[in-house]
């Protein structure tokens, strides 16, 4: 069997719970950190970058940072998935994905305390990945990062449990997204060209925990 490694900067942990069995979100960061095992090629445990909870989806998104970019195979994720599944026995599903960071920028409000974590996931329509990536890198992500209330912005490629593109923003408050400057970045001509070519789009507002 051919092993297919991918450049990996972060691991995305997605844990969902069935209705009526939601955990106490405040305890989830400690659960992730306690199970942040060493990965092949890493000489130290992973560190918890962000942990966020969606009450609507009953789902946790946690980001574990590797000490440096590492080539990982999907099979390398099994130990941490098994450890997390054991630590959260009532969870409906536990997923671990390799994330490759393709954009990162400190926001206008760097140093602020984020309370919200906004995530946009999507698969580009066939043939549109180069144009959408250029729009993200040159206009959209820099523009949103510069909005007051945005603390940090990243875009990742999810090599395991897609959609492929994951753009995420730490925000001082969810209301940042309704500000005139945020809406202006979303309403550009280039945005109108690229956004119709998003498929499998998921937009989720999480609470930082």
Image (spheres, helix red, strand yellow):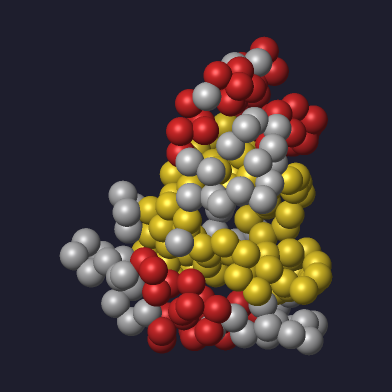
Question: Which residue is at a point 59% across and 44% down the rendered structure image?
Answer: 169
- Residue 15 visible: yes
Q: Quadrant of residue 63?
A: bottom right
Question: Which residue is at a point 67% across and 13% down the rendered structure image?
Answer: 189
- Give the residue furthest to the top: 189
- Residue 196 visible: no
Quarter of the image for the C terminus: give it. Answer: bottom left
Q: Measured from the top left, where is residue 52 in percent x and y?
A: 47, 58
Q: Quadrant of residue 86?
A: bottom left
Q: Is residue 8 left or right of residue 119?
A: right
Question: Which residue is at a point 37% across and 79% down the rendered structure image?
Answer: 88
The answer to whether residue 24 is above or below residue 131 is below
The answer to whether residue 84 is above or below residue 205 is below
Judging depth in this view, the residue of 108 and 88 nearest the camera is 108
Q: Measured from the top left, where is residue 66 in percent x and y?
A: 72, 72
Q: Measured from the top left, where is residue 156 in percent x and y?
A: 68, 51
Q: Measured from the top left, where is residue 150 in percent x and y?
A: 61, 39
């Amino acid at each position: 069997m051919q092993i297919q490694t991918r450049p990996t900067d972060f691991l995305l942990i997605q844990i969902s719970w069935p209705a009526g069995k939601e955990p106490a979100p405040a305890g989830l960061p400690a659960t992730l950190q306690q199970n942040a095992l060493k990965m092949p090629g890493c000489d130290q445990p992973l560190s918890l970058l962000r942990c966020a909870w969606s009450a609507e989806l009953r789902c946790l998104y946690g980001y574990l940072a590797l000490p440096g970019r590492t080539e990982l195979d999907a099979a390398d994720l099994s130990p941490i998935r098994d450890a997390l599944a054991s630590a959260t026995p009532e969870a409906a599903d536990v997923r671990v994905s390799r994330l490759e960071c393709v954009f990162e920028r400190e926001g206008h409000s760097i140093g602020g305390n984020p309370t919200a974590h906004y995530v946009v996931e999507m698969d580009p329509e066939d043939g549109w990945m180069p144009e959408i990536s250029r729009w993200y890198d040159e206009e959209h992500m820099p523009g949103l990062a510069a909005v007051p209330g945005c603390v940090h912005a990243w875009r990742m490629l999810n090599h395991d449990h897609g959609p492929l593109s994951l753009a995420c923003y730490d925000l001082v408050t969810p209301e940042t997204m309704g500000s005139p400057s945020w809406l202006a970045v979303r309403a550009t001509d280039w945005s109108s060209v690229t956004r119709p070519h998003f498929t499998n789009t998921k937009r989720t507002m999480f609470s930082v925990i």
